[in-house]
Amino acid sequence: MTNSDQTVPSNSQFKPHPRDFGGFEMPSSVPPGMRLELSRAPLKPGQEPVFEEWMNALNDRYEEHEAAVSSERQIFEATFKSTEANGQVWIYHLSLMGAEGAALDGQLPMGADHAAYSRRAKEPGWEELEPKFMLTPLHLRELMEKWAATGIV
């Protein structure tokens, strides 16, 4: 089969989970009280420059994230970009957080800007990938469990 014969997924293949999706059951390797999530969404056509501006703003305003990280009980967040063979650009978002953490706070300037960039750059919603395994050194795991439960170390 040649490349021209292959069927390449397009945006029509994007099936975001509904807003009320409670998430997948966590595997036993994810400590109780934590959520491990990997989400993906396609960028809107022509919005790659907006995405890059968004990521630059997040990097440039890193210190502002502390207030959000504490209330959200985020242990870590990471965003990745992937360009498929057909040119479609996807963003992937990986996070580990306390299950009882708050949602993105739109009252914080960084939270409001983050949400606005999201609306401009990516298709609405996220596809959620099902977590199957997580490995963490024991000494870090204990700190993460405390942070996830209390927001303090």
Image (spheres, rainbow, N blue to C red):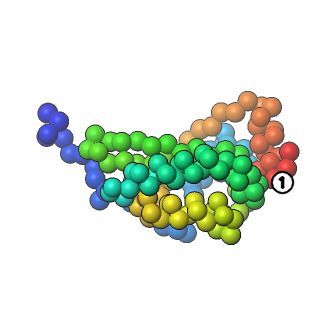
Residue 53, how many percent across, how many down? Answer: 49, 51
Report the number of discs: 1
Above or below 37: residue 6: above
Q: Nearer the viewer, residue 23 or 72?
A: 72
Residue for point 51% across, 60% down? 117
Residue for point 76% across, 37% down? 141
Residue 49, how many percent across, how many down? Answer: 41, 51
Q: Residues within 10 Å of mark 1 (few under 14, many from 20)?
A: some
Name the quadrant of the N terminus. top left
Q: Nearer the viewer, residue 63 or 142?
A: 63
- Which residue is denoted by mark 1 in the rendering? 150
Q: Nearer the viewer, residue 102 or 35?
A: 102
Residue flagged by tag 1: what amino acid is it? Thr
Above or below 105: residue 2: above
Residue for point 80% across, 48% down? 147
Image check: 65 left or right of 40?
A: right
The image quarter containing residue 30 is top right
Q: Does residue 69 appear in this view?
A: no
Above or below 25: residue 19: below
Residue 153, how many percent across, how many down? Answer: 86, 45
Question: What secondary structure is found at the residue carrying circle 1?
Answer: helix
Residue for point 75% across, 57% down? 67
Residue 37, how many percent across, how many down? Answer: 58, 49
Q: Does residue 117 appear in this view?
A: yes
Image check: 127 left or right of 134?
A: left
Above or below 42: residue 21: below
